[in-house]
Image (cartoon, rainbow, N blue to C red):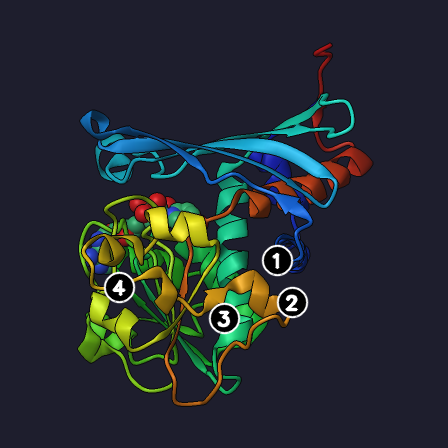
């Protein structure tokens, strides 16, 4: 069995390859070639956090990710909000082939899923990106979104301007730290990646032709958007069961403001052409990301095969 560390992953990972495998995972899921029970939550409000178990089978690969979300970690303990490990198995025998860091996998596959959604749903002439919430997930989002769209300018907002400045350092010529949500929302593509403990984007921030990615609301009770925005947008989800249970749409559905029938469809169905994506330059499109296990396992397959070929992991005898 291979143990693949975060350092090894950072060393071998290629963003364009992750984009490819994540897009392909969405396609396989839409075509019924993947299996993925909805993620299982272990809520621990007494620790201000939760854990999720995320199993999947996709494109000949199987495994499970075990991941947490503890939004107070950076401030209280100096640790990331989200940390994860992944067990990667041979689906033929069930043999565990690898245990790997999935803190980095989570960051890269989440950014890749947002980038795939943006590629299919945003106006082709979108030239500016706004990121609201500049924590751990923001940096790969900047890199992956820019890779698919080639933005002229990126507007970064965080309640802690130092965090926005740290993300801006990735591409200082392109990035500008702004002082309000309203300024960041002037961009053509707006991405929210906050802890989801309050509404950050309101109806007056949204204008014709916007594409909005909501990434932060990935558990029951989390919300980043005024539900009125959902009512005037074409909303796409990564997975119907997960999104209605724990995505941006879940609280408005629970409160009777929104319902499942209003959702335009899944990103996978847009990728395979089963349903149309953006229909006009003026409409507002919205992607509700909850994070799918198929994204993790598809990325893990790519990393396992590459680590094996390069001798990048630590070999241990498990059986
Ligand atoms: N959808 C997915 O697939 C997916 C994947 C990973 C993480 N997440 C979720 O994304 C969120 C962010 O994760 P992270 O690892 O980047 O966390 P993080 O704690 O590293 O970053 C969150 C950032 O948001 C900022 N912030 C808080 N409130 C804000 C506000 N009102 N306006 C602007 N900025 C604000 C914080 O200062 C911080 O910089 C979490 O809720 C996490 O659970 C979703």
For mark 4, what is the residue? 258
Question: Which of the two discs, 4 and 1, labels the residue nearer the N terminus?
Answer: 1
Residue beneath disc 1: 30
Category of crowding for the residue at label 2, using alpha-carbon neighbours closer than 10 angstroms: few (below 14), some (14–19), many (at least 20): some
Q: With respect to residue 181, does 133 lie above or below?
A: above
Say the numbered circle drawn on residue 272.
2
The answer for how far apart the CA atoms under marks 3 and 2 are is: 15 Å
At mark 3, the secondary structure is helix
**Picture quadrant of residue 310:** top right
Q: Residue at x 29, y 78 (%)?
A: 232
- Classify residue 222 as left or right of residue 287: left
Question: What's the distance in space between the residues labelled 4 and 1, CA to CA?
Answer: 24 Å
Say which label, 1 or 3, has the lower sequence index. Answer: 1
Among all residues in the image, which is located at the extreme bottom? 281
- The earlier-in-sequence mark between 4 and 2 is 4
In which image quadrant can residue 191 be found?
A: bottom left
Q: Which residue is mark 3?
A: 118
């Amino acid at each position: 069995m291979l143990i693949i560390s975060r350092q090894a992953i950072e060393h071998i990972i290629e963003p364009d390859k992750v984009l490819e495998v994540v897009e392909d995972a969405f396609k396989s899921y839409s075509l019924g070639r993947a299996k993925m029970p909805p993620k299982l939550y272990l809520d621990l409000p007494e620790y201000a956090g939760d854990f999720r178990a995320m199993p999947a089978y996709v494109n000949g690969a199987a495994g499970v990710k075990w991941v947490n979300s503890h939004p107070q970690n950076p401030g209280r303990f100096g640790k990331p909000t989200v940390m994860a490990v992944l067990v990667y198995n041979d689906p033929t025998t069930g043999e565990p082939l690898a245990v790997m860091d999935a803190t980095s996998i989570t960051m890269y596959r989440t950014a890749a899923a947002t980038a795939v959604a943006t590629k299919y749903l945003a106006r082709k002439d979108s030239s500016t990106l706004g990121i609201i919430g500049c924590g751990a997930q923001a940096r790969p989002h900047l890199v992956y979104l820019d890779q698919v769209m080639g933005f002229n300018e990126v507007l970064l907002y965080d309640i802690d301007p130092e965090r926005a400045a740290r993300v801006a350092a990735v591409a200082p010529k392109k990035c500008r730290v702004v002082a309000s949500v309203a300024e960041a929302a002037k961009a053509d593509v707006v991405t929210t990646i906050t802890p989801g403990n309050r509404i950050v984007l309101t109806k007056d921030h949204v204008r014709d032709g916007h594409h909005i990615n909501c990434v932060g609301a990935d558990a029951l009770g989390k919300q980043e958007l005024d539900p009125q925005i959902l009512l005037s947008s074409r909303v796409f989800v990564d997975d119907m069961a997960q999104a209605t249970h724990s995505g941006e749409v879940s609280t408005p559905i629970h409160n009777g403001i929104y319902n499942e029938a209003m959702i335009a469809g899944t990103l996978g169905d847009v990728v395979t052409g089963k349903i149309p994506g953006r229909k006009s330059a003026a409409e507002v499109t919205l992607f509700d990301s909850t994070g799918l296990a198929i994204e993790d396992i598809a990325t893990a397959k790519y990393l396992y095969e590459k680590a094996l070929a390069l001798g990048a992991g630590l070999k241990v005898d498990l059986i």
